[in-house]
Image: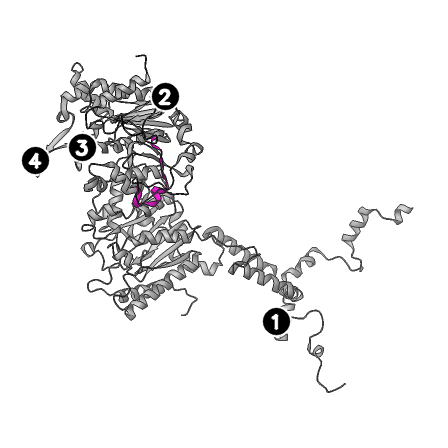
Amino acid sequence: MTSRIKPTVEELKRSDSLYSKSLKPSPTSKQRYSKYFTPSFYVSLLSRHKKALIALFSLVILSVYTSAPFIPHYHFKEPNVVIILAANEGGGVQRWKTPQEWSVERSSISNKKDYAKRHGYTLAIKDTTLKRRYSHEWREGWEKADILKQTMRQYPNAEWFWWLDLHTFIMEPQISLEKFLFEDLEKKVYRTLDHLNPLGLPVDSSYVDIENSPIDLILAQDCGGFNLGSFLIRRSEWSEILMDVWWDPAMYEQMHMTWEHKEQDCLENLYKNQPWIRERVGFVPLRAINSFPPGACSDQKDDPRYFYDSKDRDFVVNMAGCNFGDRSCWDEYEYYRNLQKSLNKRWYKFW
Amino acid sequence: MHLGIPKKSDLKPRGRNRSILPLPASFRHTLRTYKPNKIIYIIIGLIIFINWLFNGYFTTFLLSSSSSSSSSSKRGFNHLTNQEALQTLQKNHGIYKNEIIVNTNYIFPPIEHAPLLRELTLDKLFKSKLNVDTQEKVYMYNEDEDLNDVNEIKDKSNKENPLDQARKAFKEHGHKVFRSSSSNKKSSPEVVLVTGVDFEQFELSHLTKIVQNRVDYAHANKYGLYVRWIQEFIPSLQEFNNDYKWAKLFIMRAAMHAFPNAKYFWYLDEDSLIMRNDIELISYILEPDSLDPIMLRDQPLIVPNGAIKTYKNVHAKDIKFVITQSKTGLNTDSFILQNEIYGKGLLEFWLDPLMRKYPTFVNSDEDALTHILQWHPVLLSKSTVVPGRTICSLHNSNTAGEDDDVLYYQDGDFVVNFKGCDVHRTCELVLDMYLKKMNPDE
């Protein structure tokens, strides 16, 4: 009979689950979980652990937003893309900047800032004022290579660097570069000049091994050839050498009278003559990363390949050359800024 | 009951369920008693899940619906690209598009054709036209000749006529590339020895000795061999009236194309002789362990006191370009280049038309190289200067002259270079002298 009085461990366990010690009926499964669905449960949970909550909260804040020592730092996304914005173009001591120019620069910077913030990219604003070390040798333009080199050193973990001139405006900020471009990059870019060749460069060249080469430079061509107003370059051994050889005094000495567009013409020349450069350049349509407003490329103003189309919702517009002729940078900039605002308006936003 | 100042504890709410939120009591009450149906949670969860399934991100349905409606169909730029043009990739080819695939490691022209080629002259070997401005004859590369079934160019040459045969072989030679018969990468030689030979300058007997020397060495070490006639590159050299010395770069580039899986390319000029077949290049100089101790660091590129020097802190494993110096500067008669991006970049930049065209470089590929390494630190950091006697001991023509045990050949050295022998036309004599040293019995 003793065995009846002293229940076995198994029986005890079973009875524990069936009866609580306070002799209340055991909660049914419905009752057991229903408390998790009431807000009051959480309110009381939070109020009970206030100190722990504050500690946890400050730890998270420190971890995410600061680089304080002895705390594990979690980064949501390693910034893989750096946007380089060339500000203050041609500025410097030679002339005053007009209020309109200030305004354009401000909107341009805030446009890229918002875009970079939205997708977790880094924005690097680089000053391109006239500097003596360049004007002395008459090699403004090639500072692009120096800025790229410097930015690559500054952000050692980023892979892609997107150069944008000041007069560009991102019209579709919700587009992420990864989705738009980097995913399946091989399937999206042209590897030869067959599709568009305004410079008449030889399409086929010896020793070019495209199949075994990655794409390290993404460029667009406008009506006059390569356009360096908006291009993407990947950190690689290749780009390291390109940055190094882009400007060469022997080449420059021979060509500085002919190379009207400086570093752009030089790159075209390198592309034309050197297979190792050619095999890693990929071309995208101009309107993919660098649409023009109606004023640019005036010789071919009916060609739909170059000009911004609001129906197609082109990604970026570049008001290249807006300070020449009867065009006005500020007017154009305001126009596209307002257009972007109205195109991307949400129904639930009233302002 | 007293009406004094209330104590702190009197003002605190009592009970365990104190709220941290300063909300009106009624609101707190609603929160506490509100028990929504589970279904609502499930529906919200489901919406988020479906939205994630179709749109790929975890935003709520309302937020994403407005933005995706405008751009989901055009998230890429497919509508702007010509899909057909996207598919076109250029085939990798050399100067000629049609290539003759050979399986042998030794690609060299039939040297016995040298006198015939000289007899034919350049006029018969190339198509030419007259430049109206300068009244000079301009040679052009032959058109891409189609290949026939037996892997030869279609040429209506007479099989009996030796001159025709020589011309055909001359044309055909540039089309030859090595592709290993198996897909195995290892069947390609690791090192390729490259030489350019000049049938206008040297007699057949002399050329035979040079090429035989290269074949012997390549065979002893299982290397590849790539020999071209310098004259094959006349159309390129003529563009800017370049000295024949520039041909070595064109030959080197062609060699890299002909042996795409080889790792090292050693250019050795025809004015040189390999004295020891038992020296294996990789363990001798190319492995980081063997290269590291002999690299000349902080060495001026222009001797003796140029301003630009090689880097002090470079590791042998980063070196892609190995060269020696003569008394005056870099000596391009013998150099080793790796077949990868830095090697190719350096070689092709060196070969750029604007380099070949620059007045002071027209006659000197060495000056062009010195210029490139002086102005481009990235390329310089991948290059190294090694003592001359490692791969390019110089022949000391001044027999009674000073003793310089850094530059000049001594018995047992790997390679002898008789740079400048063409000035006094002593190349044949010097070569024979060294051949005799090599094989005293003959």
User: Do the residues at discs 3 and 4 belong to one chain?
Assistant: yes
How far is disc 3 from disc 2 in space, using C-alphas? 35 Å
User: Do the residues at discs 3 and 2 belong to one chain?
Assistant: yes
Work out whether B256 lies above or below A113.
above
Q: Quadrant of residue A38?
A: bottom right
What is the three-letter code of the residue carrying label 2?
Answer: Asn
Q: Residue furthest bottom?
A: B3
User: Do the residues at discs 4 and 2 belong to one chain?
Assistant: yes
How far is disc 2 from disc 1 in space, using C-alphas? 90 Å
- Of A30 and B358, which appears nearest the observer? B358
Where residue B21 is drawn, which disc sits there?
1
Label 2 Cα crowd, 10 Å radius (few <14 / some 14-19 / many 20+): some
Q: Which residues are magenta?
A: B373-388
User: Do the residues at discs 3 and 1 belong to one chain?
Assistant: yes
Label 3 Cα crowd, 10 Å radius (few <14 / some 14-19 / many 20+): some
- Earlier residue among tags 4 and 2: 4
Which residue position is annotated with label 2? B277
Where residue B235 is drawn, which disc sits there?
3
Q: For marks 4 and 1, give the one nearer the viewer.
A: 4
Where residue B135 is drawn, which disc sits there?
4
Q: Measured from the top left, where is residue A250 in percent x and y?
A: 23, 45
Q: Quadrant of residue B213?
A: top left
Work out whether B12 lies above or below A71.
below
Task: Give the residue drawn at x 15%, y 28%.
Answer: B126
- Earlier residue among tags 3 and 4: 4
Q: For marks 2 and 1, give the one nearer the viewer.
A: 2
State the SS at label 1: loop
Asked whether residue A298 is drawn in magenta, I would say no
Q: For marks 3 and 2, give the one nearer the viewer.
A: 2
Label 4 Cα crowd, 10 Å radius (few <14 / some 14-19 / many 20+): few
